[in-house]
Amino acid sequence: MEAEKTEISGKKPEVKRTLGVMSIVLMCIAAAAPLTVVAGTQPLVMTYTGNNSIPVYYLATGLILLVFSVGFTTMSNFVPNAGAFYSYIQAGLGRKLGMGSATMALLAYVLICIAVMAYLGYATASAIALFFPAVELPWWVCSLVWWAITAFLGYHNIDLSTKVLGVFLVLEIVAITILDVAIAVQGGGTGLDLSPFAPSNFLSGNPGLGLMWAFFGFIGFEATAVFKREAKDPERTIPRATYITVAFIALFYAISAWCLVMGVGSDGALAYAEETQDAYALNLAAQYVGQWLYDVIQCLLVTSLFACTLSLHNVASRYTHMLSSVKVLPEFLGRIHSKHLAPSNASAAVSVVSLVLLVVVTVIGLDPLTVYAWFANTATLCIVILQMLTSVSVLVFFRSHACAKGRFHTVVAPALAALGLASVAAIVVINFPSLTGSMTSALVMGIMIPVVFAVGYVIAARMESRSPTDYEQLATLVKEQAAA
């Protein structure tokens, strides 16, 4: 009915404002893929750091991102646009740096979409082989099937995506909770203790890598602002959704990480992680609950990765739509579907790019885990840099804009966040060759970041000289006075 009314009135269709706090929270937590992080990443964090203090790293990351969220959400009332990083960075640091950030953000979300989709194909093929040994499917066939499902859901109204994501997310959280409770109730492998939280423990080995891997588990939380145009009450919804998302992810990961360590015992957890790697949590599920939970988690790992893929696809689509609305990308990509009331053209464009990249990595013979390592780590570095620039932008912005919030919101918190995020970015850069597999792959993937940023900067510079009216309109994305 809404679409019919729009067509009769002659107005351009607009996206539906249907997303409440919990809908956005579900979308962003699904992007973080909690089951994949707990079952797949957390044991690897132990092996990379050389200690069993994984809960500390997730709590520390959550604290840094909560501090980041203070400035991020304070500025949200001044930035009505749904461009997230782009909108915030251009508001404080200028339109050219903002546009460079926008193209880099789009690169990050497209890359991580491909990374997770490749891993999803690999995980699906492995699960099928486990339950049906006679069936052998190439990973890329499975990836293409999931690509088609993602393209279909992304093209339609986002309400459909949130319902699908909500079901999968609840199932994976329930599965992890069952394992956590079973370990805690049964007293773990050698009893319950707090040794993972001891400073002598979490400062040993390589704690920097622990912090870096923990950051990877939070990717997607900042997408709360990307859905601003589709939120029912954005000035209240976005801050609440951001804080809830970060706090939930941090606490959920930390509790689950502690339970994983306790499941084996503080003294033996590190050695067991090195021995079993991504089978660590699955083995504990079979030991403490039963083979049925092992099988359930094996299946939910696939749906967890799909939920992550769909969430990231939706974020990339919103960035594409935003870049079209400011005339950086073709105008038709910014059109809202008259029936679905969603940025369907932008979603279709992201689907096409994803398909092309999947075909390319398949044809050249890249292993899906290699694709995951290259693309996911490059995207992580992009996002940490964008978060750091956002914090710097908040500092600069509030030097010239009055705000009813105190100095903690406008100066102290963003300054602390910028320092913390700069430290994490430095750790990622230093370890980039080992994360991507070699110095050559690190250079190939790493050079994409400044190049794509420069492309956005040049686009804005050309717009300034050739289309000054369009360039000036970019500044209207900031409200001079906020209802603070």
Image (tube, grey):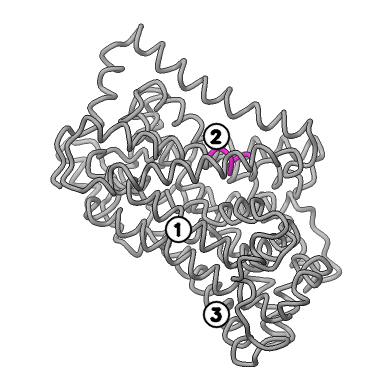
Q: Is residue 334 visible?
A: yes
Question: In 3D space, how far apart are the residues under numbered discs 1 and 3 (Cα atoms)?
Answer: 23 Å
State the predominant SS element of the stretch in magenta.
helix
Asked whether, in this view, residue 99 is left or right of residue 453, the answer is left
The residue under label 2 is 107
Q: Horizontal placement of 314 versus 16: left or right?
A: right
Query: Which of 380 and 161 lies nearest the eye of the viewer?
Result: 380
Give the vertical position of 481 relative to 231 (above or below): above
Q: Residue at x 69, y 68 (%)?
A: 52
Decide if residue 289 is in sight here. no
Can you give x and y, in whole percent of width and height, for residue 95 in the image? 35, 23
Where residue 425 appears, as percent x and y from the top left, is: 57, 40
Q: Say which of marks 3 and 2 sits in front.
A: 3
What span is in magenta?
Answer: 378-383
Name the residue that disc number 3 marks: 177
The disc at residue 63 is 1
Kindly identify the residue that appears in the image at 58 percent across and 35 percent down.
353
Q: Residue furthest right?
A: 134
- Please tell me how crowded label 3 is: few (under 14), some (14-19), or many (20+) other residues with Cα within 10 Å: some
Dot 2: what SS?
helix
- Where is residue 189, by image quadrant? bottom right
